[in-house]
Image (tube, rainbow, N blue to C red):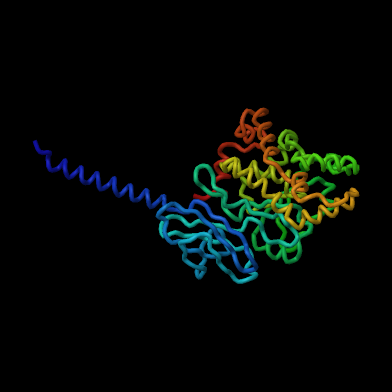
Amino acid sequence: MSRPRSRIRFGILALMCVTAAARLALTAAATITSAECEQVDAKTFRIQYAAEPGTGPVRIYASASPSRIESGGLLLTTRVSPVDVSVPPGSGRVYFHLKPAEGPARVVATRRLPLEGAINFRDLGGYRTADGRFVRWGLVYRTEHLTGLTAGDYAYIGRLGIRLVCDLRTPGEREKAPTRWIGTAPSFLQVPVLTDADLARSTAPVTPEEFKRRLAAASNGQPTTGSTSYDRYVLEYAGSYRRIFDRLVSGELPAATHCTAGQDRTGMFSAMLLTMLGVPWDTVVADYLLTSRYRLSDEIVRQRGIEWQRQYGLDEPPSPAVIRTMQGLRGETLKATFDTITRTYGSFDRFRREALDVSDEELVTLQARLLEP
């Protein structure tokens, strides 16, 4: 017996709807999933991106804003990655908007800002979260102290619109290396982590014999300096970090957080923030380890080797590998601290609620401010 005509029509219509939905889903999936940017010279930037199959040609725009594509900003259209693009020298902070034929634009910029007086001033934007969103560029920065910034540096960062600077240094550190902001000053929040006495103990000079012992251990690949965890930061100084998160939740952005080296105390802040935003652990650790890449460049390592040779009476400078072993960061340090959080509070979420005083509702607000689709 033949099927009723109306049922056949309904079946065809349903099939058409399913097909259209599948095409729509495919189009929605055809998007840029990651992007990176490095500055090659004064005017050239190398952009590398990954995209879903079927994304097609991508138009690349240059803009002074991470939140909008400016008219006249089209640089080129490409189907290949990586690709080099050029902007006029002296353009300041440049954000590149990568726009596929279908789907949202993906924003990318250089992570480290090209400053003369700060080698570790960088943007936390661009990281992808576990649910597929991205940290917005141009809203949260992490850096070392600002004492060395030049007038040219201040002209550069003055265009970033920074409203809040959070200083994790002790009173003695601030007195020794004060911040002298040039231009319209942001609000400054002083939230010390550790004390001057703590720093005096950790930076006390070692004898040549002790240094050579550490050098021998490092030659065998054993880290010999630095803390094995940041337990005190999260157990004794959560209140300092709490005050920063309170200001971020309230919308005091863009913001920059720093200590002296922009490494340990600032690294812990960045790891907590990225974890709150849902950034995967491997990415959190990778951001933490970037500090060693910038603070232990080939030239810095070479100079440090010469200094150590002279200071400790060595026959020759230590090898670059040994210096990096002695002074480089390790992912295990960060993991040990997060393990302490879990043992003490049961979970990072409970630590976030109880120690950092960021409620579930405030977390939603923070994510809304700092994440984009």
Q: Reply above or below: 164 against 204.
A: below
Above or below, 165 against 61 in this view is: above
- Viewer-side residue, 252 vs 115: 115
Residue 223 placement (x, y as % from top left)? 76, 40
Foreground of the two, 316 or 117: 316
> Farthest front residue?
315
Quarter of the image for the N terminus: give it.
top left
Q: Position of residue 231 (x, y in %)?
A: 73, 34
Residue 86's place in the image compared with 106, above or below, is below
118 or 286, nearer to the observer: 286
Q: Which residue is drawn at 75% across and 63% down?
A: 182
Q: Which residue lies furthest to the left in this view?
A: 1
Nearest to the observer: residue 45 or residue 197: 45
Left or right? Give the position of 107 relative to 31: right
Give the residue at x 65% y 70%.
Answer: 90
Tell me where residue 278 appears, x and y as whole percent: 56, 41
Q: In this view, does 151 lie to the left or right of 246?
A: right
Can residue 187 be seen from the camera position used here? no
Looking at the image, residue 161 sits to the left or right of residue 233; the answer is: left
Residue 210 in view of the camera: yes
Image spot of residue 269 (x, y percent): 68, 43
- The quadrant in which residue 299 appears is bottom right
Q: How many marks?
A: 0
Residue at the spot x=43%, y=55% of the render?
Answer: 103
